[in-house]
Every structure is written in C-alpha cells, then in structure tokens.
Amino acid sequence: MPETPQPSSVADVKEALGRAGYLADEPAALVAYLAQRLGKPVLVEGPAGVGKTELAKALSRATERHLIRLQCYEGLDEAKALYEWNYRKQLLRIQAESGTDAERASWEAVHGDIFAEEFLLTRPLLQAIASTEPVVLLIDEIDKTDQEFEAMLLEVLSDFQISIPELGVIEARTHPIVVLTSNNSRELTEALKRRCLYLWLDYPEVEREMEIVRLHSPEIDERLARRLVEVVHMVRQLDLKKPPSIAESIDWARALLLLGADDLDSAVFERTMSIIVKHRTDMDLVAERVGVKLGGARLDVETAG
Amino acid sequence: MSRPQADGLPSGLAPRVVAFCDELRREGLAVGTSEILDAFEALETVPWEREDDFREALAATVAKSQEDRRVFELLFDRFFFRAAEWEALGRGIGEGRRYEGGERLEIDELREAVRQAIAEGRDGEMRDLARLAISAFGRGGEGSGVIGVDVQRIRRTLGLQAQGGRTDGEEPALDREQINRFERHLRRELERALIERTEKLPSSRPLAELDRALPTSPAQDLAAVHRAVAQLKRRLATLGHERRGRRRGAAVDMRRTMRASLETGGVPLRLKHRPRHPRRPEIYVLCDVSTSVTSASVFFLSVLHALHDSFRKLRSFVFIERISEITDVFERERDFRTISERISREGGVADVSGYTDYGRVWLEFLEQIVDDLGPRSTVIVLGDARTNGREPHAEVFASVCERAGRTFWLNPEPRLYWNYGDSVMAAYERHCTAAFECWTTRHLEGFVNVVAGGTPLD
C-alpha cells in the first residue's frame, strides 16, 4: 500500500477541518487525527443533526480525497453494498458467443470470460477498496441495517479486503479513511465496535455553535447570532420530538438575514419558527415556552430603555 | 526501593495503562486485548504530556459507548489521581501543613465565599476553598477518618442546599451539579490528605452504583439484570433466523434463476426461489408498575429497554389502573434513567387509588389495539395478577389471547403465592400460551430459553 501523506499533529487536523468549513472540537479533531495515523475506522455516534455526516464530508475535503458514501437502510444487502454480477451483460456475452456457430468457444473460455471484472458492478464498499486514489468511505446510519450486515462489514473494516468467490480476494490499494455514523437507535455489536475508534458527538456549546453559524453565514451580526444560538439552545432544552440540528440553526440564520431582521423578538420568532421546529406538537410547545420568553425579554428592554 | 509495594500501583506508563484497562474491565467495560493494543498505538501518536489528548486518545480506543465513556471519566480521574499521589509518596513530595490560616477564618465568611464560587461555577476557586474548608473544620489531620462522613459534615456546616431542597428563604438555592463538583473537590482533598498521612493508597473500591448514576432498587442486583438482559438481547436477536433456511419461499426468483443457468449454458436447470424474509414478530408488552411490584418493575423496565433494541415492531404499555403506551418514550430516549423518570412523570397510569385494576386494563388494551392484534402478534404481560378485589374480566383477557398468536405471562411472585389472597393468576393462566414465575435473572433466562424453542431449565 503506498504511503499517503499523514498529518503531523492534532492541531494540523483541526486547522485543515476548519479550512474545509468544519469547526471540530478537541475530541473530534483528535479522533480524526488518530483515524489517519492508525488507519482505523471511526464510529461516530450522537443525536441527529450534530454534524456526524458532515465530519466525514469535511474530512474528504480536508484531505482532498474522494468521498464514497454508503447510505444504510433496513434490508440493505451485499448486492447493494459490495458488488453484483451484471447478469444481463453476461447473458449477452454468452449469446454473442453461441451466435458464431462455426467456432464455438469452449465452455472453459466462456466461463473464464463472463466472470471477469468487466461484468462486475461495483457498489460503494468495493469501489472504496478497489480505488486507486485514496478515499474517504462514509457508511451512514449503520444502525439502520441488520446485524448480519454488520458482520459482513467486519472483513472490510479490519483487513480492508473483499473476497469474491469467482475472482479471489481484492485488497485495498490505498488505505481508505472509514467513517461510520450511528444515531444510536440500536446497540451495535461488540465485534464492530472493537474494530473502530469511538467518537461521541453532542450538540456544541453556545460559543462554538456561534462560530459555526458565523462561519456559514458571515454577514450575520454578532449580537443576532448570539441571540439566535441562545434561543436554539433554549429550544433544545425542551422535550421535543425532534430538537433543532446545527444545520437548522444555520438555515435559520440565513433566513433571518434574508428577511432583514435585526433582532429576534417574539413576532419574528413566530414567523420563522418553522425552520427549526418541525412537528405540530413541538411547535405548540416551543411557541408556548420560548416565544413567550422572547416577548418578555423584549418588553424588559423597552421598559428599561 | 523503600516505598511500600503492598497496595501500590505498577510503575511506568505501559503497565499503568494496562492496570487502568483492567480496572475498566472490572467495571464491566468490554476492553479486550485488541483494544489495549489500539490504545498503545494511539498513545504513540499523540503528545502524551498533554492530559486532554492523552485522555481522549485512550477514551476513543477503549470506551465505545456513551455509557462506557461515563464510567471511563469517573475511573480515569480516580485512577490517575491515585497514580500521581502514589508517585508523590514514593518521591517524598508532600505539601506539608496546608492553609494554616484556615482556623482563623470566620465560618460565615468562608460559607459566603464557597457559595459565591459555587454559584459562579469557578472550578479552581472551589478547589482552594475545599482545602480551606477542610482545614477550617480542623479535620485536615484528625477527621472521622471516613471520607464520605467528613464530606457530608462539612457540607452540612456550610449549609449547602441544592435546588428543590427547602431553603430558608433568604439564601438562593444552588445548582445541584455545582454542589456535586464542590463535593468532589472536598473528597479529593480529603483523600490526598489521607494518603499523605498514612503514606499508602487506600484500597480501590469498585464504583458504587450511586456513582454510576444508574437506577437502584432495593431487591435486585442491577448489574446482574443488565448482564442477563444483554444475553437475552443476543438470544432474541438470533431468534427466528433459523427459519430462513428451513422454510424456503415458493416464489421463483427470475433473476437468480437466470444467473444460475449461466453455469449450465443458459439452460435453467436449477430453480432459485426468492428467500422469504424473516417476519419480525410483533410484540406487545404490558408492564405493571404499581407499588405491589415496585422492586420488580425496575427489572421489568430494563427488560423492556433491552427488547426495544432488538425488535422494531415492539409496542410497550405500562399500567396500574389505566393503560398507557410508552413506545415512543423508549424510541426517543436511550438512557435508561431518563426513561424511568419520564415514565413515572408522564405515564399517567395511576388514577385515584394507585391499585392495579386488571379488568379495566384489558378492556382499554383491547379497545386500543383490537385491529392490530393478529396471529403473528405476541403478547407478553409482566405483572402479579393481584386485582385488589376488583373484577378481573378474565373473558376480556381470553379474547386478547384468542386474537394474539402467543401470550406469555411473567409473574414476579414465586409460584407458591399465586392464587393466594387477591391473586387471580389461575383465571388468566388458563388462556396464556405459558406463564412463568420471574423474579430472578435466572428465571428470565429460562423464559427466553422456552420462547426460543429450548427446554425449560430444571
């Protein structure tokens, strides 16, 4: 396996991720660094919308590697994840052979022929392994699949190889960076966890989320950004069906910019609330708890000033 | 080497990391040899004189869930604190008599300073004040000797009250989390003093259940429950998979048949069938959470918690006088403690008396899910069948059983007590596929065994 350039320190990784538009905290930067140095897969867990998938994308941008993504879902099988024989093409090949009656190719020749790489449909995992360029492999929402699928992944994750009965073992030419994400909807198997580095991502602190928001919508006023992030944090404190994600804070910031709002009072909040809260029952709760507070805060300001 | 080696720690980084992993294992983390190797590999690549990097690198390789991570944090602090103290002891580094001025300090002044620091959450100050407090109470050298007792005494004298506790009006309540932090400083400083005084490390105890902040119940050993539940989870996860091979589906899979025919020159000699997908069973679990089964209900709730990990189509209900569906609580919350809190808070199952009313529960259950019950459904009831003299409505339960494919009853009372007093177990047992006594983890395993098609344990 050819050597790929490796980061020399955690700070380097953090900076590279920052340039790729991802503000990593210490643990995230360290794990990303270890993943590159040790060549081990990373298992990222955390609530929805804290930037698990984004971390993989940022890694691919920061290391200038291609991103290969395998989106998991219930019922995902090997044919969709690893490889599949293109049987239509194989059939065509056989028919083409038998058409030339005069010199009927021997069975051996045809057999060898139709199980060549030409007839192989590569799926994300095989693509990542067989790629000549170093890649980042993102296996998204691994908790949505069955345990059998996890077991199948083990060969790929620990040895970076795939066995195809007709062709033999295909080994990785370069060492991919593998990121697995999980929303923790079920416990993953020990065997899988054993092979991975573990990273728990949580909602960021107010300060860091502010930086993130301002990185993605730089025009926003600092005071407004702080207010916005504080409100989002307040909303997350509530017991909601779906708490607002970081991406939604960013969307909200952009929306406020478009509307030309320069303060976040209860009227603006009520109009734009649907950007961060997306359930009927949640909206009622948020309007009741947070909307009222905002109005109150504004009144205070007015009476004080 | 003059230092006492009896209860000491191995010296050198590598043996210490291994010793640390060993301690993690004793707390139930699955730290294998491969994890330890990974940890060393990772530690080689980070500057290990920086504590944060060292800690994160170690955590990423050995603590593989949020729960593990919490235990890791607790142990990490304790272990490396002990290691540092041990090293200091060996080299004869002591701090001597500290904070001599402590005795002269006015108690009220100190109390005010502590409250201030706690309210503002300043960590370093809290630490210094903890030392001051210890010496101010004259227990720096000759306290009761039991650290936990000393901590509580100091806390009482300082009058630290958390929110929710009754405050005397004029003093604002403090954040419980911050008070705990102050207590941790107190504990640590007392420990440090103790180590210096006795010149040896106190024996390391396993983390108390309380430290790990797991729910405690009077009767059950929760760790054992969790282990059994983990086992149950594995059994359940593989349940039904054996069907896959035996019962081949009848539908011909054209694509795979064609593909197989390539081997015989395009003549479809072997028919390939579409594999029948294993049907995930639909499970309905009804769990009694009334006071008569208090000790068992923590156990049952943890069983429910485990079941939810293994089955997508699982609906959970809790009942006392009425029934309430809690499926979405389990789906949204991962943390067991939050779940039990939420269920007790918003379950809405107790009405007036707080006594179980099985008859009404069946009626409500049947009404709620009458259309969903089918031959593929399995109903599991966890309860003691004590109706408190109310109408048992066994005929309603019978119609539930009739509609469902299988019905199991797990009773937290020994079989001996069934049908005594207000227990109407016999009336219900007749309609169940099977009923089990279930008050130890062993019984639970027995139940799993039967459900999985094995033979009952003795």
Image (cartoon, coloured by chain):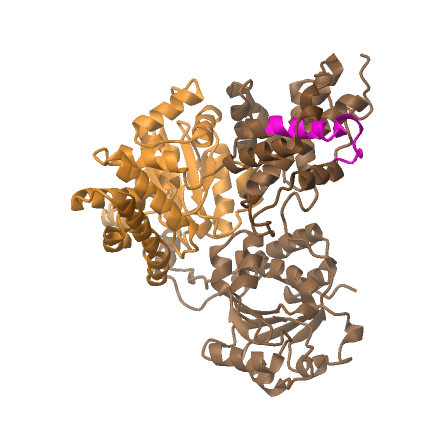
Majority SS type along the magenta span = helix
The answer to whether residue A230 is visible is yes
Horizontal side, residue B454 vs residue B420: left or right: left
The answer to whether residue B18 is visible is no
Asked whether A93 or A135 is in front, the reply is: A135
Q: Residue at x 44, y 55 (%)?
A: A239
Q: Position of residue B103 (x, y in %)?
A: 71, 25
Chain assigned brown? B
Above/below status of A4 relative to B215? above
Q: Quadrant of the N terminus of chain A?
A: top left
Q: Position of residue A184 (x, y in %)?
A: 48, 48
Asked whether B317 or A283 is in front, the reply is: A283
Q: Position of residue B410 (x, y in %)?
A: 67, 70
Q: Colour of chain A?
A: orange
Magenta segment: does it hold A236?
no
> What is the quadrant of residue A242 in the picture?
bottom left
Asked whether B36 or B208 is in front, the reply is: B208
Q: How many marks can you see?
A: 0
Above/below status of B424 relative to A234? below
Q: Residue at x 62, y 42 (%)?
A: B160
Asked whether B421 or A253 is in front, the reply is: A253
Q: Residue at x 80, y 33 (%)?
A: B145
Above/below status of B31 relative to A173? below
| Magenta region | B127-147
Horizontal side, residue A189 vs residue A204: left or right: right
Q: Position of residue B335 (x, y in %)?
A: 54, 51
Horizontal side, residue B50 vs residue A96: left or right: right
Magenta segment: does it hold B134?
yes
Q: Quadrant of the C terminus of chain A?
A: top left
